[in-house]
Amino acid sequence: MKLALPPAFIYEWRRSRSTRSTIWLLALIVASAISTGVNELANGTEEGFLSGAVGHVSAAGPVAAILGAMAIGTEFRWNTIRQLFITFPRRYVILTAKIGVIAGLVAAASLLGSVVGTAFGVVSGDAVGSIPDWLGLSLRGMLVLIGWAVIAFGLAGLGKSTIVGVAVPIAVAFLVEVALLQVAPDGLLTAVLPFVNASEALSVQVPAGEAFEHLAVFWAWVLLSLGACMFVLGRRDA
């Protein structure tokens, strides 16, 4: 039985599949795993098997943000968002289709990156470790990358700009939060910062239960960004 998808999802899938930049960006996510794996071969670590599952995520986060921001930002750039809303009148379906397709693509690329990174870890001489731990790390890595994409999507939708969607999360992750950690390294403020918690969720040293708690904090910010975007675009003129 053939699965029947809503027209909006079919449109978004075809758009993403035919956009060359999307393909290249997905390839970069996998390439980041290859780069990390080559470094593993050169230096080696005691936890190459497990770290290979998430080694690509730190470098691939901004790439996922670009994918997420482009999914909605390019519609504003070329002023096609209005026509899209007219063609498929239910705005929430449109927005869900966009973020759903991008999330699926990012998830697939992340999983492939985990497999590639782990393969390099095993080749470098690291023994195969706990499979459940590897699966947990791969899942958290995939959810972190999807979170990067969703946050960027939400910000791009709110700002009606791809640049806003990409620049804001990158600036927060690599500038703002780093500065706040210098000011209050052990304070309550750092416990609620999105990308600090995302990083902790990916740590091999953090127990699985605690890691998923950090992931939950990160995803609270992800859903806040997406919810604000859905609310605003669902009610105001695009």
Image: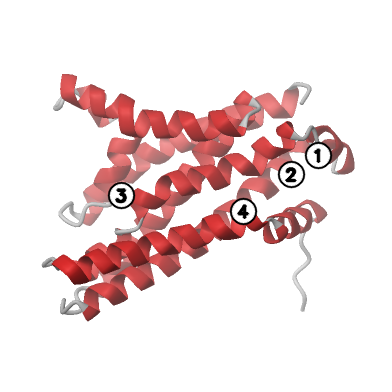
Q: For numbered disc 2, what is the local secondary structure?
A: helix
- Can residue 136 be seen at all in this image of the molecule? no
Q: Nearer the viewer, mark 4 or mark 3?
A: 4
| Closer to the camera in the image, 194 or 24 | 24
Task: Identify the image quadrant of residue 35.
Answer: bottom left
Q: For numbered disc 1, what is the local secondary structure?
A: loop
| Residue at image mark 2 | 93
Point out residue 47 in the picture as x, y percentages from the top left corner: 16, 66
Calculate the distance from the C-alpha at mark 1 to the C-alpha at mark 3: 34 Å
| Residue at image mark 1 | 90
Point out residue 122 in the picture as x, y percentages from the top left corner: 23, 78
Calculate the distance from the C-alpha at mark 2 to the C-alpha at mark 3: 29 Å
Point out residue 181 in the picture as x, y percentages from the top left corner: 20, 26
**Which circle's residue, 1 or 3, is located before the other in the chain?**
1
Q: Residue at x 74, y 44 (%)?
A: 93
| Residue at image mark 3 | 212
Calculate the distance from the C-alpha at mark 1 to the C-alpha at mark 4: 27 Å
Q: Residue at x 53, y 43 (%)?
A: 66
Type of residue at label 1?
Arg
Mark 4 burial class by Cα count in 10 Å: few <14, some 14-19, many 20+? some
Point out residue 142 in the picture as x, y percentages from the top left corner: 42, 57
Cβ atoms under marks 1 and 2 closer than 8 Å: yes
Type of residue at label 2?
Val
**Which circle's residue, 2 or 4, is located before the other in the chain?**
4
Residue 192 is left or right of residue 229, and the answer is: left
Cβ atoms under marks 2 and 4 closer than 8 Å: no
